[in-house]
Structures are given as structure tokens and as C-alpha cells.
């Protein structure tokens, strides 16, 4: 049962939908519902794969569904620049460890930006590969405390495509928990652009914890501005935002979001 009306038989577009749940595990189940519905209707669906701690409950929930995902194609959101091949915190390693192996994806059908040639032209190659796959059907997203999605830091153009970026110091500090120290966190990354992300047919954004509350407010209810890249989701025709109570704590319209979710139409529950 996907948390949006994507399954409606007339294919009508959704507007942004905010679903407030009690826990990250509950959010993961809902996101997994959406992915399962997609894959059952299209076994070779194209997924946009986020890394980090936020989507872990989604991957765990999906792994328990017993689905054949061997034909699914995947495109990671981003990758560090400068880590040696096989580094455990490279997103190629993380995707393999946390997504490909637990879900039974075919490794050759999952791509990570920058892993197939010179970094200078990696963005163009990645965009071409996404286009050749027919575009991303469902993109899983997290959001950083700076409001970034992917590694699109504040100031990123809403038309941006996959490219090399410099990480903010706050992002490096936030990601230092995966490394020995903040100095070990790479300074640069390659990331799908906001324009690339907006090209996906369905966006599912997840956020948990009070530390993400301000970013969620900005993304969902704030002005659409490059100062908060996550606000770009307001420009998309089909967005599902799934947050726990802590991440939803700053939302002005939280009561309405709960009311709308509780009273969705029967065809929205399919």
C-alpha cells in the first residue's frame, strides 16, 4: 500500500503529501510499500538509491518482503571524490553492503556516479546512463541539516545536473561519525543535481529526529529557494514526505497532514 496515489488507475499526478508516523521503522515500511507496489507492476523499475542512515529502515523493510529484485536497476545519488577503491565508507561500498546484497539486486545493474572513468566527465556519463535507462521511477531521498538533498549544498541551482561539488564544513562534520575524524571526510563529492532529482517520476523523502525538523519545515512549508535545496521538492508533481514525530515537530500544518492521511480516499489506499 504505497503512501501516495501513484497507483491510481488514471495515472493522475499527486501534489506533495506529508505522512507523519511514530517511528523510523514505520516510515521504512511505508516507503517499502511504495517500492514494492512499483516493482510488482514493473520488475525492471529504476530506483534512485540514497545512502546514509535515513533509508536503512526502508532497505530493511524491503528485504523482508521476499521480492525478486534482480531486474531492478539502481542509480546512487552521490559519491565521495578521492576515497580509494574499496574504502568501506565510499558510497559504492555502502550501496553494495546495505542495498545490493540484502535486497538481492544484480550488482551490474546498480551504478554509482564517478565509478566508470575520469571524474572530469563523470557527470555527463551518469546523466546519459539515467536517460538510457528511461529515467528514475522512484527516488529515495534523505535531507541534511543544511537542507541538502543528495550532496546539493545551499546555493545549488534547481536546474543542476550530476556534477562535482565542494561539501560544506557542516556536512563534513555531520558525516564525520562514519570516519576516524572530520579531516578524513572528503572535501569533494559527485552528486546528482537538483534538476536530475526532479526528473524522477516519484520522490520519497524521509527524515527522522528533531535535528532534521528545521530542514523539513523549510523543504515542505518554506520558500522555494536555492538557500535550502530541499525546497526543490515543492516543484515536483509527485512527492511523498515521510517523517517521524520529532522531524515533524516544527510543521505548521501537521494537524492537517495527519487528518488528510487518515481520511484519504479508497483508491489512494491501494
Image (cartoon, rainbow, N blue to C red):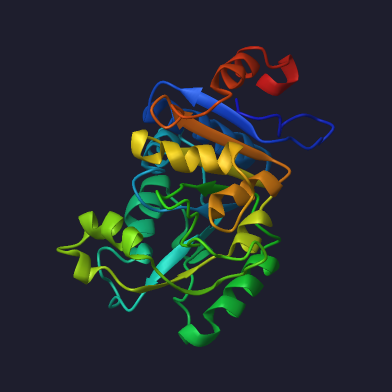
Quick check: can you spot residue 45?
A: no
138 or 254: which is nearer to us? 254
269 or 248: which is nearer to us? 248
Where 188 sits versus 63, above or below?
below
- Total marks shown come to 0
The quarter of the rendered structure image containing the C terminus is: top right
What residue is drawn where x is 37% and y is 42%?
A: 56
Is 245 placed left or right of 121 in the picture?
left
| Residue 186 x/y as whole percent | 30, 72
What residue is drawn where x is 69% and y is 41%?
A: 238
The quarter of the rendered structure image containing the N terminus is: top right
What residue is drawn where x is 63% and y is 62%?
A: 196
| Residue 171 x/y as whole percent | 35, 59
Is 13 placed left or right of 245 in the picture?
right
What residue is drawn where x is 65% and y is 74%?
A: 128
Where 222 sits versus 111, above or below?
above
Residue with the most extreme left position = 180
Amino acid at each position: 500500500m504505497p503512501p501516495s496515489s501513484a497507483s491510481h488507475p488514471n495515472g493522475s499526478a499527486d501534489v506533495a503529501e506529508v505522512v507523519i508516523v511514530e517511528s523510523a521503522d514505520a516510515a521504512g515500511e511505508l516507503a517499502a510499500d511504495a517500492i514494492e507496489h512499483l516493482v510488482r507492476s514493473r520488475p525492471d523499475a529504476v530506483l534512485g538509491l540514497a545512502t546514509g542512515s535515513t533509508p536503512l529502515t526502508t532497505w530493511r523493510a524491503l528485504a523482508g518482503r521476499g521480492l525478486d529484485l534482480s531486474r531492478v536497476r539502481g542509480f546512487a545519488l552521490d559519491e565521495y571524490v578521492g576515497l580509494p577503491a574499496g574504502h568501506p565508507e565510499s558510497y559504492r561500498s555502502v550501496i553494495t553492503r546495505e542495498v545490493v546484497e540484502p535486497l538481492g539486486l544484480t550488482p551490474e545493474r546498480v551504478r554509482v556516479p564517478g565509478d566508470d572513468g575520469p571524474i572530469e566527465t563523470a557527470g555527463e556519463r551518469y546523466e546519459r546512463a539515467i536517460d538510457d535507462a528511461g529515467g528514475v521511477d522512484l527516488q529515495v531521498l534523505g535531507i541534511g541539516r543544511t537542507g541538502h538533498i543528495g550532496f546539493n549544498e545551499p546555493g545549488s541551482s534547481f536546474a543542476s545536473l550530476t556534477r562535482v561539488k565542494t561539501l560544506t564544513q557542516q556536512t563534513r562534520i555531520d558525516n564525520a561519525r562514519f570516519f576516524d575524524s572530520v579531516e578524513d571526510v572528503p572535501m569533494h563529492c559527485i552528486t546528482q543535481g537538483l534538476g536530475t532529482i526532479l526528473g524522477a517520476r516519484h520522490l520519497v523523502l524521509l527524515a527522522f529526529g528533531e535535528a532534521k525538523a528545521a530542514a523539513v519545515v523549510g523543504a515542505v512549508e518554506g520558500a522555494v529557494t536555492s538557500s535550502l535545496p530541499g525546497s526543490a521538492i515543492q516543484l515536483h508533481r509527485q512527492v511523498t514526505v515521510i517523517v517521524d514525530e520529532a522531524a515533524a515537530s516544527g510543521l505548521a500544518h501537521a494537524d492537517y497532514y495527519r487528518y488528510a492521511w487518515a481520511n484519504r480516499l479508497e483508491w489512494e489506499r491501494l
